[in-house]
Amino acid sequence: MLPKKPLVGIIMGSSSDSKIMHNAAKILDDFGIPHEDQIVSAHRTPTRLEEYAKYAEKNQFRVIIAGAGGSAHLPGMIASHTILPVVAVPIMVYNDKSDKKEFKFSAFGGMDSLLSIVEMPNGSPVATVGVNKAANAGLYAVKILSIEFSELKPKLKKFKERQHLSVIAESDELKKSGLVKFVAKKFK
């Protein structure tokens, strides 16, 4: 049975990352998995990062999901301070805090954060999902947790079944209306 206390920690380097990282929280909420969300900057709060790693272990978190953009040191640094599995989310879009009205993009379109995460040296591995794919990080955490909490397995199977049926329904709609009308309706 799933406990009420957090099993997953979701951390991000900045509040601007929350626009992406909330998708991991949505998935965990959908599966009824308690999580705790915080801002922990690898560069601006390095001692907080080390304290968070100890805190996560002490509180028996099972997984940490860490999102970061730019040089993206947060996932690797948290992995270097804990034995917990870390799932990393490289982030492309960030909000320049001097102008909150529009989104800015990282200088290298998210490749900077992706490469800085996936190229971790031996000894501090992180599992990495695609750029801005926080929902996949949430799903990966659910799969990890399903090893210990078997009640998650049928929920995961239902999730996969819903995905399958959704694709079949879209395909039937495409076949019925034709490609041009399908696109006009779907993406207007």
Image (cartoon, rainbow, N blue to C red):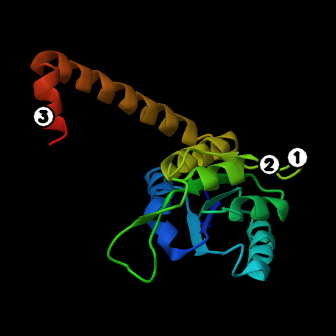
Return the x and y of residue 23 as percentages of the image width and height: 45, 56
- For label 1, the residue is 122
Q: What residue occupies the far top of the structure in this picture?
A: 175
Return the x and y of residue 126 as percentages of the image width and height: 74, 50
Q: How many neighbours does mark 1 have within 10 angstroms: few (below 14), some (14-19), or many (20 or more)?
A: few
Which label's residue is closer to the chain start, 1 or 3? 1
Return the x and y of residue 113 as percentages of the image width and height: 62, 56
Task: Specify the label residue 9 is tagged with.
Answer: none
Type of residue at label 3? Ala
Return the x and y of residue 89 as percentages of the image width and height: 59, 54
Disc 1 is placed on an element classified as loop
Quarter-wise, where is residue 70 in the image? bottom right
- For label 3, the residue is 184
Q: Nearer the viewer, residue 49 or 90?
A: 90
Is the Cβ of the residue at disc 1 closer than 8 Å to that at disc 2? yes
Q: Nearer the viewer, residue 28 or 76?
A: 76
Disc 2 is placed on an element classified as loop
Type of residue at label 2? Pro
Residue 85 position (above or below residue 185): below
- For label 2, the residue is 125
Residue 179 as seen in the image, left or right of residue 74: left
Residue 78 position (above or below residue 113): below
Disc 3 is placed on an element classified as helix
Nearest to the eye among marks 2 and 3: give it.
3
Residue 34 as seen in the image, left or right of residue 188: right
Number of numbered tags placed on the structure image: 3
Q: CA distance from mark 1 to mark 3?
A: 49 Å
